[in-house]
Image (spheres, grey):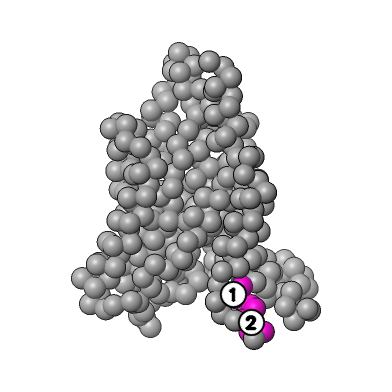
Amino acid sequence: MDQLFDVSLFASTLRMVTPILLAALGGALCSRVGLFNVGLEGLILIGAFAAIVGNHLTGNVWLAVLFAIVCVSVFSALMAYMSIHLKANIIVVGISLNFLAAGLTTFSLRAIFNVKGAFYDKDMVGLPKWDIPLIKDIPWLGDVISGHSPLVYLSIVLVFVLQYYLFKTVSGFRLLAAGENPTAAKSLGIKVTRIQYGAILMCGVLCALAGAQLSLGQVTMFTEGMTAGRGFIALVATMLGQSSPLGVLGSSMLFGLMDALSTRLQGFSVPVHFTMMLPYLVTIVAMFFFKDKSYMQEARKANESSR
């Protein structure tokens, strides 16, 4: 048991949770403005592929992250235009985006790199690892917290930044009002459409960072379908956290721990097929117990009661 729950397990949990947490924060922003974004999986996948392409073309990891943000923002803007301006069903748009991302990245992998399945370049440099002064010298804690990529620390900082923004600032209250009661918000002069566009675009930026962490911060390569359902897990984390940044952090940590634990169990002669399904099994169990506690359902009930 001590070998299972050791320092490296919790350190790997922080790495595993980062893509889920970043995408879940983006999903929380969308749900707060009344848009249920099921396209997180596709946005992460596009971000992961774009980060590899940018790194391969420029040789600079930060330009690669910026390139991923630009590419994902284009698809986020398309999604926002279809769901907000054209009034298309956002669920259908999100599912379509997931299929588009899967097919487009597979095609682009063969068209750009002329390979199938995966692309790896030994000369490609991934995200740097940062050692935190003073903390790195603390036994156990230093081994868990220190030595991760900048995006890992950025994801934690964003949790508290968004928590403060949503519940302590005027613009944050306007964003909440735009999602809870759009009609009343418009009557007060709040530009609901502009806020919804901004939320989806910001969600795209966060998903691009999630994809960059996945392809440059963990493995420094791209494989077809490498998101492996993390976008859908992030969607569940958003619902369990009731679209609150701190709640999303807690639920994401749970799924990150299960993801890291599933990888660790493979070294203890546990069947691979069982370990691979562990994170998704926990997702199903979590949804069963918290099926009536999502923020979107509470907001929908509030809107119905106000009519």
Q: Which residue sits at x=38%, y=40%?
A: 90
Please state which amino acid type lies under the numbered disc 2: Val
The region drawn magenta spans 262-268
Report if the CB atoms under discs 1 and 2 are less than 8 Å apart.
yes
Label 2: element kind = loop
Residue 305: image location, x then y, percent: 58, 19
In the displayed orientation, state which residue is furthest to the left. Answer: 111
Please state which amino acid type lies under the numbered disc 1: Phe
| Quarter occupied by the N terminus | bottom right
In the displayed structure image, the side of residue 93 where residue 267 appears, left or right: right
Task: Decide: is 177 above or below 241.
Answer: above
The stretch drawn in magenta includes residue 267: yes
Residue labelled with disc 2: 270
In the displayed orientation, state which residue is furthest to the front. Answer: 288
Q: Which residue sits at x=57%, y=34%?
A: 297
Residue in front for this viewpoint, 124 or 104: 104
Number of residues whose C-alpha sits closer than 10 Å to that of mark 2, classed few (under 14), some (14–19) or many (20 or more): few
Task: Decide: is 292 above or below 261.
Answer: above
Report which quarter residue 270 is drawn in. bottom right
Number of residues whose C-alpha sits closer than 10 Å to that of mark 1, classed few (under 14), some (14–19) or many (20 or more): few
The label number, if any, that marks residue 274 in the structure image: 1
